[in-house]
Amino acid sequence: MTRTVYVNGDFLPEHEAKVSIFDRAFLMADGVYEVTSVLGGKLIDFDGHAKRLQRSLDELEMRNPVTVEELLQIHRDLVEKNGIVDGLVYLQITRGAPDDRDFVFPDPETTTPTIVLFTQNKPGLAESPAAKKGIKVISIEDARWGRRDIKTVQLLYPSMGKMMAKKAGADDAWMVEDGFVTEGTSNNAYFIKGNKIVTRALSNDILHGITRAAVLRFAREAQMEVEERNFTIEEAQGADEAFVTSASTFVMPVVEIDGVALGDGTPGQRALRLRDIYLDESRKAAI
């Protein structure tokens, strides 16, 4: 079955979809993106993703070519056209394709933003085998630019980080700056000590995770203490449990950090409980 994608107002077979070689995302990484999960044919945390998208666009002084209502309908149409039960919807908006390459932003009055969406079919997305055994992470230097709070398509270093982890026999990497963990390559990072969850506070240094916000809210409702502050790899290694959150992995237990097993080396019960709560509540609120 040919996948249907969305490009600048049109639904097209994926092999017919085209974007200009002068598009700013291609030449300058001048674009932003969001990924929304689909469970049971419904969108998870769509409102949060739409709000963060607009924030990213505003920070880059980039125009949004669609309204929130139009964006929701496009998501729903793509889910239906591609028969997605469990999966992902990827969205990317760029500054557009001017007539030629230039470091200076093109005139927004004459250069229309590019908008692209496509789906990824992920049957059993919420039943990931990795969640049952947990993942192993390594630490790496955080060599990204300073505005990680803007969800841009500048993903080369996170991709390199994934490869560093793979070469080391691990599943992912936690990035470290000035001695403190910032976040994972594509997720927010946490550890649990006793009844307390510790994670880095929001700033320009990390992505303001939509799943992060929901999970911390659910944790507080479950009478867990949440402390948002800087922490080191060594502190996390001495924790009872650890986990990461993202739109595509939800709550994913971490069982090893730089070769040091946490607890008995299996997913912690609190992390697994938070995963269950998040999935249950998110399914109820899905649209």
Image (cartoon, rainbow, N blue to C red):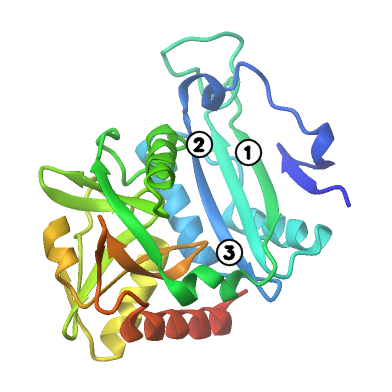
Q: Report the amino acid beneath label 2.
A: Arg
Q: Residue at x 49, y 84 (%)?
A: 281
3 vs 1, front mark: 3
The residue singled out by tag 3 in the image is: 37
Residue 267 seen: yes
Residue 19 image point, x, y percent: 69, 26
The residue singled out by tag 2 in the image is: 63
First along the sequence among labels 2 and 1 = 2
Which quarter of the figure has residue 57? top left
First along the sequence among labels 2 and 3 = 3
Report the residue that reaches farthest toward the bottom. 223
Q: CA distance from mark 2 to mark 1?
A: 11 Å
Judged from the image, the secondary structure of the residue bearing numbered disc 1 is: strand
Which quarter of the figure has residue 59? top left
Horizontal side of 168 relative to 205 (left or right) equals: right
Q: CA distance from mark 2 to mark 3?
A: 24 Å
